[in-house]
Every structure is written in C-alpha cells, then in structure tokens.
Amino acid sequence: MKTAELAAKLGATIVTGKAGIDKEIKGVYCCDLLSWVMSHAGKDSAWITVHTHMNIVAVAVLSEIACIIIPEGIEAEEATIKKAVQENIPILCTGLTAYEVCCIAHDCGI
Amino acid sequence: MREIALHILDIMQNSVAAGAGRIGVSVTAGNDTGMITAVIDDDGCGMDERTLQEVTDPFTTSRTTRKVGLGIPLLRSSCMRSGGNFSITSQKGHGTKVTASFGKDHIDRPVLGDLAGVVADMSASFPKIDIRLELISGEECFTYSSAEAARILGEVPLSEPAVIEWLKEYISEGIKHIFGGVLDEIAG
C-alpha cells in the first residue's frame, strides 16, 4: 500500500506535502527508542513514534523507513517537517493511538 | 540507547577514532544534586570550532563525518528527555570532553547498565590506550586505570579472558559500593 493511501485510511494529515507519498509501505514498526529503531526497524516500514525531534528524520533515512506516523494528536516541529521534506520522508499526524494505527494497518493488509 | 553505559561506549569509540592515548570516564551521582553526570574526556585529535558545532546535528554528522554518526544526537536527546543537560567542548590537537547529565530520578532516564563490561572490554580491546574510570558519590570515590592494571599484571595481557572476567567483577563491586542506594537500579 502506498503512503498516501494509508494516510487516507487513517484519516491522518500529511504534514510534508507531496514528498514521498508514493512510497510503498511493506510493514509497520512501533518503538520510541531511536537507537533500537535503527537496529531493528524493517526497510520500507511505516514507523510510529511519539518523538518529534529532527533526529527521527535521520533515523528514518538511515533505516530506509517509508514514512513516519506521529500518533495521539502530537504536532511535529517545524524544523523536523522541513528536513523531512528535503529527505523525502512523509510525516503523517493522527489523533489515533499507536495501537489503533496498527489495527487499521493490519486491516489494510499491511 | 537503553543504557547510559552504551552511550558511554559510543562516545569512547569516538575517542578511539580520534587517536586518543587516554580516555577518562567519570560518573558522578548523588542524592544531594539529584543528577547523574557522565564525563568522557580524551587526549585525541580534537575538533575545530566548525566541526564542534556540527556534531549535534544528525544530518551534517551522519553525512560528512562518519566517525561521529548519530551517537551524539541520541545522547543529547536522552539527556534532555531526562531533565539533564549535554555539552561538548574540544580543542583541535588537544582532545575532547563530553559532559552528559540526567535527572537521577527522572522516569525517562536510561539505567546505568553494564558499565563494568564496557570498561573491561574497552581495556581489553585497546591495550595501548589508558582507559580510566572514576565513580563518585558524595565523599566516596572509586578509581580504575587500565594502564595501572596492565602494570600490575606484567606479562599477562588485559585481553586474557580470566583477566576480563576479574576486571568486570572488580568494577561491578566498585559500582555497587559507590552507587548502591543512590541509583534505583543498584541495590544498596
């Protein structure tokens, strides 16, 4: 499933415009310890995290993450969004919890 | 990272890459200050002002100066998240000093972790570098130096498995003695 399609299913806001929205999502990964994500997240995953620091974009680039999903109505920092656009990493913001995002992703066949 | 010890290991590896002959690790924790502070300083090649300003930026560092990587940004955010602070100072040709503090009782503080293992393994892996450890709490202090340990051992190398095991136990005892009853995760 493409990032834009998942965003629609989640009712999430894509805060990074058109950057990377055609990327194919192959799995979902959920963890907030960035070093752990770097060593465990699968390539092309949609990654759910409550962090909003620019470091998440660096981790996403290194781990070849398809998109970042920020749950529970948390807003991303301006600098993070700017960097994500440059690096072609979509950021999706949603009011759902990480668990609800996982359930919907599962129902979508991811 | 899950443990402060792993952050320390990461910074020590930067010191190795900087060609240090001495790496000092000092960990101070006290009930009075409510903080746990780790200082890693070395006599390596150091950095100029420009590089120093770039090291906390995950992009500049991971792209251009590979030896630094995401280690510093991750340590910095871990400190800030736990009500602590982070600073790095360096002098080209003289060395670098990283100071990382954490709120001792902050809920997001990583555990101290296997600091004994890190120091013992680093001592074994880099016998030419003097690896020093200092643990401080109140009036109590524990010190270790791999150069001094090597001098006492004489012919026996620090990389000898039995020596590594002994070092781990010795340093673990020091940690228990100094931080027992000070850090939640270490029984007093």
Image: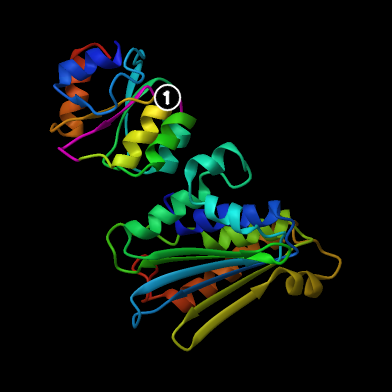
In the picture as drawn, the residue positioned furthest to the bottom comes out as B139
Residues B107 and A73: in front is: A73
Residues A77 and A96: in front is: A77
Q: Main secondary structure of the magenta part?
A: loop
Q: Quadrant of the C terminus of chain B?
A: bottom left
Q: Which residues are magenta?
A: A63-74
Residue positioned 50% across, 58% down in the render: B5
Badge 1: residue crowd in 10 Å (few <14, some 14–19, many ≥20) = some
- Residue that badge 1 annotates: A42
Q: Is residue A92 above or below residue B171?
A: above
Residue A71 magenta: yes
Residue positioned 64% across, 74% down in the render: B144
Image-quadrant location for residue B95: bottom right
| Left or right, residue B175 beside residue B22 | left
Rendering coords of residue B97 (x, y %): 59, 66
Parent chain of label 1 = A
Q: Is residue A20 above or below residue B57?
A: above
| Left or right, residue A62 beside residue B46 | left
Residue positioned 72% across, 59% down in the render: B45
Residue A69 magenta: yes
| Disc 1, SS | loop
Residues A7 and B130: in front is: A7
| Left or right, residue B34 beside residue A59 | left
Rendering coords of residue B87 (x, y %): 48, 64
